[in-house]
Image (cartoon, helix red, strand yellow):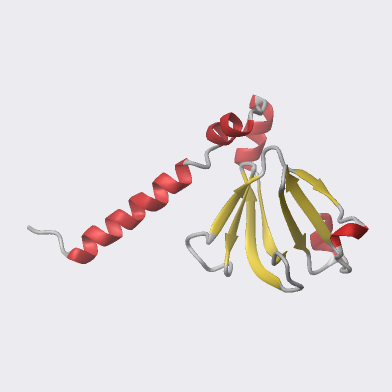
Amino acid sequence: EQESEDDIHSSRSSLDRQSHHRANTTMHVCWYRNTSVSMTDHSVAVENQLSGYLLRKFKNSNGWQKLWVVFTNFCLFFYKTHQDDYPLASLPLLGYAVSSPVEADGIQKDFVFKLQFKSHVYFFRAESKYTFER
């Protein structure tokens, strides 16, 4: 029995997704960012998950993009909606600092937090105080 072109393409796409995901494993990120995680923290992170909508600020613009975000295993996974099966992107958080924006950031919105690792800076905004405090 021969594989159809669609079967080959879907298998290849699945493998591409898996190999891309493997590059963001906790061990790989720890090595790349020269950091470590205790076994206790790792165990807790694997067993817990938080999800909800956040708005991500576009670089060099006043625009914000609404995304469904899943936080698990030291990583943010971004989806267009909560119904999507595969993330649009992921952001491993090991080494990132969480803070409030400063005046120089030029963000005049409520419920905003800043994620920064070296020169990589991201701003996210929650839609409510409750979501922001989670």
What's the residue at 70%, 64% (across, down)?
59
The x, y position of residue 80, in whole percent, is 57, 69
Task: Classify residue 3 as left or right of residue 93.
Answer: left
Quadrant showing the N terminus: bottom left
Quarter of the image where one finds residue 102: bottom right
Which quadrant of the figure contains the C terminus? bottom right
Tell me what residue is drawn at x 64 percent, y 59 percent. Answer: 69
Please provide percent x and percent y for residue 64.
72, 71
Q: Position of residue 44 (x, y in %)?
A: 67, 36
Q: Residue at x 75, y 50 (%)?
A: 115
Q: Nearer the viewer, residue 102 or 72?
A: 102
Q: Nearer the viewer, residue 132 or 35?
A: 35
Examine the rendered structure and indicate whether residue 102 appears above or below residue 106: above
Q: Quadrant of residue 13?
A: bottom left
Give the farthest residue toward the left.
1
Q: How many numbered discs sit on the rendered protein?
A: 0
Instruction: Give the left or right position of residue 85, taking residue 56 as reference.
Output: left
Residue at the far bottom in the pictured view: 63
* Residue nearest the observer in this picture, 15 or 114: 114
Residue 90 screen position, x and y as percent:
57, 53
Residue sitting at x 69%, y 67%: 58
Front one among 87 and 120: 120
Image quadrant where residue 37 sits: top right
Single out the residue that lies furthest toward the right: 103
Q: Is residue 47 above or below residue 111?
A: above
